[in-house]
Image: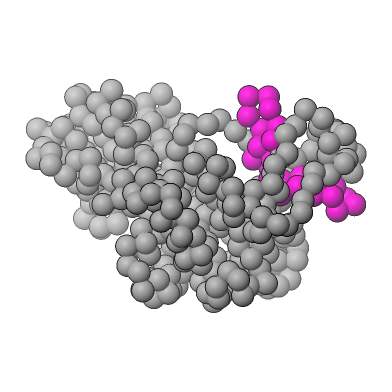
Amino acid sequence: MIDRRLLQIIKTKLYDGKAIVLLGARQVGKTTLLHSLFESAEDTLWLNGDEPDVRALFENITSSRLKSLFSGKKNIIIDEAQRISDIGLKLKLITDNIQNIQLVATGSSSFELANKVNEPLTGRKWEYKMFPLSFAEMVSHHGLLEEKRLLPQRLLFGYYPDIVNHSGSEKEILRQLTDSYLYKDILMWESIQKPEKLLRLLQALAFQVGSQVSYNELGTMCGLDNKTVEKYINLLEQVFVIFRLSSFNRNLRNELKNSRKIYFYDNGIRNALIANFNQPELRTDIGALWENFIISERIKFISYNGIWANHYYWRTKDQNEIDYLEEADGKLSAYEFKWSPNAKASSSRSFKNAYPESEFKVIHNGNFDEFIL
Protein backbone atom coordinates (compact mmCIF):
# COMPACT_ATOMS: atom_id res chain seq x y z
CA MET A 1 0.00 0.00 0.00
CA ILE A 2 1.25 3.48 -0.87
CA ASP A 3 1.58 5.72 2.20
CA ARG A 4 -0.01 9.12 1.80
CA ARG A 5 1.68 12.22 3.23
CA LEU A 6 -1.55 13.40 4.83
CA LEU A 7 -1.87 10.23 6.90
CA GLN A 8 0.74 11.23 9.47
CA ILE A 9 -0.33 14.88 9.38
CA ILE A 10 -3.93 14.03 10.23
CA LYS A 11 -2.87 11.55 12.90
CA THR A 12 -1.32 14.38 14.89
CA LYS A 13 -4.65 16.28 14.88
CA LEU A 14 -6.94 13.49 16.09
CA TYR A 15 -8.97 13.91 19.28
CA ASP A 16 -8.06 17.51 19.96
CA GLY A 17 -11.69 18.68 19.93
CA LYS A 18 -11.73 19.91 16.31
CA ALA A 19 -13.37 18.48 13.22
CA ILE A 20 -11.15 17.40 10.33
CA VAL A 21 -12.26 18.43 6.85
CA LEU A 22 -10.57 16.61 3.97
CA LEU A 23 -11.12 18.07 0.50
CA GLY A 24 -10.04 16.72 -2.87
CA ALA A 25 -11.26 15.54 -6.26
CA ARG A 26 -13.14 12.29 -6.54
CA GLN A 27 -10.91 9.18 -6.67
CA VAL A 28 -7.78 10.77 -5.20
CA GLY A 29 -7.87 8.41 -2.19
CA LYS A 30 -9.68 10.29 0.58
CA THR A 31 -11.80 7.31 1.69
CA THR A 32 -8.86 4.91 1.46
CA LEU A 33 -6.82 7.20 3.71
CA LEU A 34 -9.61 7.34 6.29
CA HIS A 35 -9.93 3.54 6.27
CA SER A 36 -6.22 3.39 7.06
CA LEU A 37 -6.83 5.63 10.06
CA PHE A 38 -10.07 4.17 11.41
CA GLU A 39 -10.68 0.71 9.92
CA SER A 40 -9.66 -1.16 13.06
CA ALA A 41 -11.78 1.05 15.32
CA GLU A 42 -15.05 -0.73 16.12
CA ASP A 43 -16.63 2.41 17.58
CA THR A 44 -16.60 4.25 14.23
CA LEU A 45 -19.73 5.25 12.32
CA TRP A 46 -19.34 5.61 8.55
CA LEU A 47 -21.83 7.71 6.60
CA ASN A 48 -21.81 8.54 2.89
CA GLY A 49 -23.47 11.72 1.68
CA ASP A 50 -23.88 10.23 -1.81
CA GLU A 51 -26.56 7.92 -0.36
CA PRO A 52 -30.12 9.35 -0.29
CA ASP A 53 -31.01 7.84 3.11
CA VAL A 54 -27.96 9.48 4.70
CA ARG A 55 -28.96 12.87 3.28
CA ALA A 56 -32.52 12.31 4.55
CA LEU A 57 -31.15 11.46 7.99
CA PHE A 58 -29.69 14.96 8.31
CA GLU A 59 -32.84 16.79 7.24
CA ASN A 60 -34.15 18.90 10.14
CA ILE A 61 -31.71 17.18 12.50
CA THR A 62 -31.62 18.33 16.14
CA SER A 63 -28.92 18.08 18.77
CA SER A 64 -31.00 15.50 20.68
CA ARG A 65 -31.35 13.36 17.58
CA LEU A 66 -27.62 13.63 16.90
CA LYS A 67 -26.77 12.49 20.42
CA SER A 68 -29.03 9.47 20.00
CA LEU A 69 -27.64 8.69 16.55
CA PHE A 70 -23.98 8.91 17.58
CA SER A 71 -24.31 7.40 21.05
CA GLY A 72 -21.34 5.18 21.94
CA LYS A 73 -19.32 6.22 18.90
CA LYS A 74 -15.79 7.58 19.12
CA ASN A 75 -15.34 8.45 15.45
CA ILE A 76 -17.90 9.88 13.01
CA ILE A 77 -16.88 9.78 9.34
CA ILE A 78 -19.07 11.62 6.81
CA ASP A 79 -17.84 10.88 3.29
CA GLU A 80 -18.88 13.17 0.40
CA ALA A 81 -20.37 15.49 3.00
CA GLN A 82 -20.91 18.24 0.43
CA ARG A 83 -24.06 16.39 -0.71
CA ILE A 84 -25.77 17.13 2.63
CA SER A 85 -27.62 20.45 2.67
CA ASP A 86 -26.35 23.09 5.11
CA ILE A 87 -23.52 20.74 6.02
CA GLY A 88 -21.56 23.45 7.83
CA LEU A 89 -24.29 24.08 10.39
CA LYS A 90 -24.78 20.35 10.92
CA LEU A 91 -21.08 19.76 11.50
CA LYS A 92 -21.14 22.64 13.98
CA LEU A 93 -24.07 21.01 15.81
CA ILE A 94 -22.06 17.82 16.17
CA THR A 95 -18.86 19.48 17.41
CA ASP A 96 -20.77 21.73 19.84
CA ASN A 97 -23.09 19.13 21.33
CA ILE A 98 -21.26 15.81 21.31
CA GLN A 99 -18.14 15.54 23.42
CA ASN A 100 -15.18 13.19 23.08
CA ILE A 101 -15.68 12.21 19.45
CA GLN A 102 -13.59 12.75 16.36
CA LEU A 103 -15.62 14.15 13.48
CA VAL A 104 -14.19 13.81 9.97
CA ALA A 105 -15.90 15.12 6.84
CA THR A 106 -14.67 14.65 3.29
CA GLY A 107 -15.75 16.54 0.18
CA SER A 108 -15.00 16.26 -3.52
CA SER A 109 -15.85 19.92 -4.03
CA SER A 110 -15.02 23.09 -2.17
CA PHE A 111 -17.94 25.15 -3.43
CA GLU A 112 -20.55 23.21 -1.44
CA LEU A 113 -18.46 22.01 1.47
CA ALA A 114 -15.79 24.64 2.12
CA ASN A 115 -17.96 27.69 1.49
CA LYS A 116 -20.61 26.41 3.87
CA VAL A 117 -18.16 25.10 6.44
CA ASN A 118 -15.78 28.01 6.91
CA GLU A 119 -18.07 30.35 8.79
CA PRO A 120 -19.99 27.86 11.00
CA LEU A 121 -16.82 25.93 11.86
CA THR A 122 -14.46 28.86 12.39
CA GLY A 123 -11.95 27.76 15.04
CA ARG A 124 -13.49 24.29 15.16
CA LYS A 125 -11.78 22.49 12.28
CA TRP A 126 -8.54 21.45 10.64
CA GLU A 127 -8.86 21.57 6.85
CA TYR A 128 -6.62 19.71 4.39
CA LYS A 129 -6.53 19.30 0.63
CA MET A 130 -5.71 15.92 -0.88
CA PHE A 131 -4.34 15.52 -4.40
CA PRO A 132 -3.68 12.57 -6.70
CA LEU A 133 -0.56 10.68 -5.70
CA SER A 134 2.59 12.78 -5.76
CA PHE A 135 6.09 12.18 -7.06
CA ALA A 136 7.33 12.42 -3.46
CA GLU A 137 4.85 9.80 -2.23
CA MET A 138 5.89 7.39 -4.97
CA VAL A 139 9.58 7.98 -4.22
CA SER A 140 8.88 7.04 -0.60
CA HIS A 141 7.03 3.95 -1.85
CA HIS A 142 9.63 2.40 -4.17
CA GLY A 143 12.63 4.73 -4.34
CA LEU A 144 13.87 7.68 -6.36
CA LEU A 145 15.52 5.65 -9.13
CA GLU A 146 12.39 3.62 -9.92
CA GLU A 147 10.13 6.67 -9.93
CA LYS A 148 12.46 8.60 -12.21
CA ARG A 149 12.39 5.62 -14.59
CA LEU A 150 8.61 5.89 -14.62
CA LEU A 151 8.62 9.62 -15.39
CA PRO A 152 7.47 9.23 -19.04
CA GLN A 153 4.50 7.17 -17.86
CA ARG A 154 3.59 9.76 -15.20
CA LEU A 155 3.75 12.55 -17.76
CA LEU A 156 1.26 10.66 -19.93
CA PHE A 157 -1.12 8.97 -17.47
CA GLY A 158 -0.76 10.98 -14.27
CA TYR A 159 -1.01 10.00 -10.65
CA TYR A 160 -4.59 9.02 -9.83
CA PRO A 161 -4.26 6.02 -7.46
CA ASP A 162 -6.38 3.75 -9.67
CA ILE A 163 -4.08 4.57 -12.60
CA VAL A 164 -0.89 3.88 -10.65
CA ASN A 165 -2.25 0.60 -9.25
CA HIS A 166 -3.59 -0.78 -12.55
CA SER A 167 -0.81 -0.63 -15.09
CA GLY A 168 -2.12 -1.48 -18.55
CA SER A 169 -5.61 -0.10 -17.91
CA GLU A 170 -4.69 3.58 -17.79
CA LYS A 171 -6.64 4.73 -20.84
CA GLU A 172 -9.82 2.93 -19.83
CA ILE A 173 -9.73 4.36 -16.30
CA LEU A 174 -9.01 7.88 -17.56
CA ARG A 175 -11.88 7.61 -20.02
CA GLN A 176 -14.26 6.79 -17.16
CA LEU A 177 -12.95 9.68 -15.07
CA THR A 178 -13.15 12.27 -17.83
CA ASP A 179 -16.53 11.14 -19.20
CA SER A 180 -18.38 12.71 -16.29
CA TYR A 181 -17.27 11.35 -12.93
CA LEU A 182 -14.89 14.16 -12.01
CA TYR A 183 -17.55 16.75 -12.89
CA LYS A 184 -20.44 14.94 -11.20
CA ASP A 185 -20.98 17.64 -8.59
CA ILE A 186 -20.99 20.46 -11.15
CA LEU A 187 -23.47 18.70 -13.42
CA MET A 188 -25.69 17.88 -10.45
CA TRP A 189 -25.77 21.22 -8.61
CA GLU A 190 -25.44 23.70 -11.39
CA SER A 191 -27.99 22.00 -13.66
CA ILE A 192 -25.76 22.55 -16.66
CA GLN A 193 -28.00 21.97 -19.65
CA LYS A 194 -25.23 21.47 -22.18
CA PRO A 195 -22.44 19.42 -20.58
CA GLU A 196 -20.81 19.02 -23.99
CA LYS A 197 -19.85 22.71 -23.80
CA LEU A 198 -18.22 22.10 -20.42
CA LEU A 199 -16.21 19.30 -22.03
CA ARG A 200 -15.33 21.56 -24.97
CA LEU A 201 -14.08 24.19 -22.53
CA LEU A 202 -11.94 21.61 -20.74
CA GLN A 203 -10.45 20.51 -24.04
CA ALA A 204 -9.67 24.12 -24.95
CA LEU A 205 -7.99 24.62 -21.57
CA ALA A 206 -5.98 21.42 -22.06
CA PHE A 207 -4.63 22.71 -25.36
CA GLN A 208 -3.70 26.05 -23.75
CA VAL A 209 -1.75 24.73 -20.75
CA GLY A 210 1.25 26.98 -20.20
CA SER A 211 -0.24 29.82 -22.24
CA GLN A 212 -2.01 32.98 -21.16
CA VAL A 213 -5.77 32.33 -21.15
CA SER A 214 -8.39 34.69 -22.58
CA TYR A 215 -11.98 34.13 -21.43
CA ASN A 216 -13.20 35.90 -24.55
CA GLU A 217 -11.21 33.59 -26.82
CA LEU A 218 -12.35 30.52 -24.89
CA GLY A 219 -15.96 31.66 -25.15
CA THR A 220 -15.68 32.04 -28.91
CA MET A 221 -14.17 28.56 -29.22
CA CYS A 222 -16.82 26.92 -27.02
CA GLY A 223 -19.94 28.89 -27.89
CA LEU A 224 -20.20 30.44 -24.42
CA ASP A 225 -20.32 34.03 -23.19
CA ASN A 226 -17.51 35.39 -21.01
CA LYS A 227 -19.48 35.19 -17.77
CA THR A 228 -20.35 31.54 -18.36
CA VAL A 229 -16.72 30.71 -19.18
CA GLU A 230 -15.59 32.33 -15.94
CA LYS A 231 -18.33 30.55 -13.99
CA TYR A 232 -17.37 27.15 -15.42
CA ILE A 233 -13.68 27.75 -14.71
CA ASN A 234 -14.50 28.71 -11.12
CA LEU A 235 -16.52 25.52 -10.72
CA LEU A 236 -13.81 23.32 -12.27
CA GLU A 237 -11.31 24.86 -9.87
CA GLN A 238 -13.59 24.15 -6.94
CA VAL A 239 -13.85 20.46 -7.80
CA PHE A 240 -10.04 20.32 -7.99
CA VAL A 241 -9.70 19.56 -11.70
CA ILE A 242 -7.81 22.76 -12.59
CA PHE A 243 -6.07 25.62 -10.84
CA ARG A 244 -5.10 29.14 -11.88
CA LEU A 245 -1.89 31.13 -11.70
CA SER A 246 -2.34 34.88 -11.69
CA SER A 247 0.16 37.31 -13.16
CA PHE A 248 2.67 38.93 -10.80
CA ASN A 249 3.03 42.70 -10.93
CA ARG A 250 4.71 45.15 -8.58
CA ASN A 251 7.24 47.45 -10.21
CA LEU A 252 6.88 47.73 -13.98
CA ARG A 253 4.19 49.63 -15.85
CA ASN A 254 4.09 47.12 -18.68
CA GLU A 255 3.60 44.05 -16.46
CA LEU A 256 0.34 42.22 -17.17
CA LYS A 257 -1.97 42.82 -14.24
CA ASN A 258 -5.14 40.78 -14.77
CA SER A 259 -4.09 37.79 -16.83
CA ARG A 260 -3.96 34.15 -15.83
CA LYS A 261 -2.70 30.72 -16.80
CA ILE A 262 -4.65 27.55 -16.08
CA TYR A 263 -3.18 24.14 -15.26
CA PHE A 264 -4.55 20.68 -14.49
CA TYR A 265 -3.88 18.99 -11.18
CA ASP A 266 -3.18 15.80 -13.11
CA ASN A 267 -1.42 15.24 -16.44
CA GLY A 268 -3.44 12.11 -17.20
CA ILE A 269 -6.72 14.04 -17.09
CA ARG A 270 -5.25 16.69 -19.38
CA ASN A 271 -4.00 14.15 -21.91
CA ALA A 272 -7.27 12.20 -21.86
CA LEU A 273 -9.21 15.35 -22.72
CA ILE A 274 -7.14 15.91 -25.86
CA ALA A 275 -6.86 12.15 -26.61
CA ASN A 276 -3.08 12.26 -26.86
CA PHE A 277 -0.97 9.58 -25.18
CA ASN A 278 2.02 9.73 -27.51
CA GLN A 279 5.36 9.24 -25.81
CA PRO A 280 7.10 12.43 -24.59
CA GLU A 281 9.84 12.20 -27.22
CA LEU A 282 7.24 12.32 -30.01
CA ARG A 283 5.19 15.22 -28.72
CA THR A 284 5.16 18.78 -29.94
CA ASP A 285 3.58 19.84 -26.64
CA ILE A 286 6.29 18.36 -24.39
CA GLY A 287 7.04 21.83 -23.00
CA ALA A 288 3.44 22.32 -21.85
CA LEU A 289 3.28 18.74 -20.57
CA TRP A 290 6.44 19.22 -18.53
CA GLU A 291 5.35 22.61 -17.20
CA ASN A 292 1.99 21.24 -16.05
CA PHE A 293 3.65 18.28 -14.34
CA ILE A 294 6.26 20.32 -12.48
CA ILE A 295 3.90 23.07 -11.30
CA SER A 296 1.24 20.62 -10.11
CA GLU A 297 3.88 18.60 -8.23
CA ARG A 298 5.25 21.77 -6.66
CA ILE A 299 1.73 22.70 -5.50
CA LYS A 300 1.42 19.27 -3.83
CA PHE A 301 4.84 19.64 -2.21
CA ILE A 302 4.02 23.06 -0.77
CA SER A 303 0.62 21.95 0.52
CA TYR A 304 1.81 18.75 2.20
CA ASN A 305 4.82 20.43 3.79
CA GLY A 306 2.85 23.31 5.28
CA ILE A 307 4.73 25.98 3.33
CA TRP A 308 2.99 29.35 3.12
CA ALA A 309 3.69 30.68 -0.36
CA ASN A 310 2.05 32.66 -3.14
CA HIS A 311 2.22 31.41 -6.74
CA TYR A 312 2.34 33.47 -9.91
CA TYR A 313 3.70 33.68 -13.40
CA TRP A 314 5.22 36.85 -14.86
CA ARG A 315 4.78 38.49 -18.23
CA THR A 316 5.09 41.93 -19.77
CA LYS A 317 3.25 43.49 -22.68
CA ASP A 318 6.35 43.07 -24.84
CA GLN A 319 6.28 39.27 -24.26
CA ASN A 320 9.00 38.88 -21.63
CA GLU A 321 7.91 35.97 -19.47
CA ILE A 322 8.90 33.72 -16.57
CA ASP A 323 7.03 30.42 -16.13
CA TYR A 324 6.60 30.40 -12.37
CA LEU A 325 7.22 32.69 -9.40
CA GLU A 326 7.02 31.78 -5.76
CA GLU A 327 6.86 34.33 -2.96
CA ALA A 328 7.50 33.12 0.58
CA ASP A 329 8.81 34.87 3.69
CA GLY A 330 9.59 38.01 1.71
CA LYS A 331 11.69 36.09 -0.81
CA LEU A 332 10.88 35.95 -4.52
CA SER A 333 12.05 32.92 -6.52
CA ALA A 334 11.73 32.66 -10.31
CA TYR A 335 11.74 29.42 -12.31
CA GLU A 336 11.83 28.43 -15.95
CA PHE A 337 10.82 24.89 -16.89
CA LYS A 338 12.63 23.11 -19.73
CA TRP A 339 12.23 19.43 -20.61
CA SER A 340 15.79 19.03 -21.85
CA PRO A 341 18.82 19.73 -19.63
CA ASN A 342 20.52 21.16 -22.73
CA ALA A 343 17.88 23.80 -23.36
CA LYS A 344 19.11 27.31 -22.68
CA ALA A 345 17.16 29.71 -20.50
CA SER A 346 17.96 32.88 -18.63
CA SER A 347 16.05 35.33 -16.53
CA SER A 348 14.59 38.36 -18.28
CA ARG A 349 16.81 41.42 -17.95
CA SER A 350 13.80 43.61 -17.15
CA PHE A 351 12.77 41.18 -14.41
CA LYS A 352 16.27 41.19 -12.93
CA ASN A 353 16.35 44.97 -12.93
CA ALA A 354 12.90 45.25 -11.34
CA TYR A 355 13.48 42.51 -8.74
CA PRO A 356 17.24 42.38 -8.12
CA GLU A 357 16.93 40.36 -4.91
CA SER A 358 15.06 37.50 -6.59
CA GLU A 359 16.62 34.12 -7.31
CA PHE A 360 16.38 32.38 -10.69
CA LYS A 361 16.67 28.70 -11.58
CA VAL A 362 15.95 26.44 -14.55
CA ILE A 363 14.15 23.18 -13.73
CA HIS A 364 14.67 20.34 -16.25
CA ASN A 365 14.41 16.56 -16.33
CA GLY A 366 17.89 16.25 -14.86
CA ASN A 367 17.36 18.26 -11.66
CA PHE A 368 13.57 18.38 -11.11
CA ASP A 369 13.59 16.04 -8.10
CA GLU A 370 15.30 18.75 -6.03
CA PHE A 371 12.31 21.02 -6.71
CA ILE A 372 9.51 18.65 -5.70
CA LEU A 373 11.06 16.52 -2.93
x%, y% of residue 204? Answer: 65, 69
Q: Residue at x 9, y 32 (%)?
A: 72
Residue bounds of the magenta highlight = 311-333
Q: Residue at x 64, y 40 (%)?
A: 311
Tag count: 0
x%, y% of residue 207? Answer: 65, 68
Looking at the image, residue 185 sits to the left or right of residue 74; the answer is: right
Looking at the image, residue 186 sits to the left or right of residue 323; the answer is: left
Q: What colouring style does the render use? A: one colour
Q: Nearer the viewer, residue 66 or 305?
A: 305
Is residue 321 a member of the stretch shown in magenta?
A: yes
Q: Residue at x 26, y 44 (%)?
A: 34
Q: Nearer the viewer, residue 45 or 228?
A: 45
Q: Main secondary structure of the magenta part?
A: strand
x%, y% of residue 285? Answer: 66, 68
x%, y% of residue 23? Answer: 41, 45
**Residue 232 appears in view:** yes
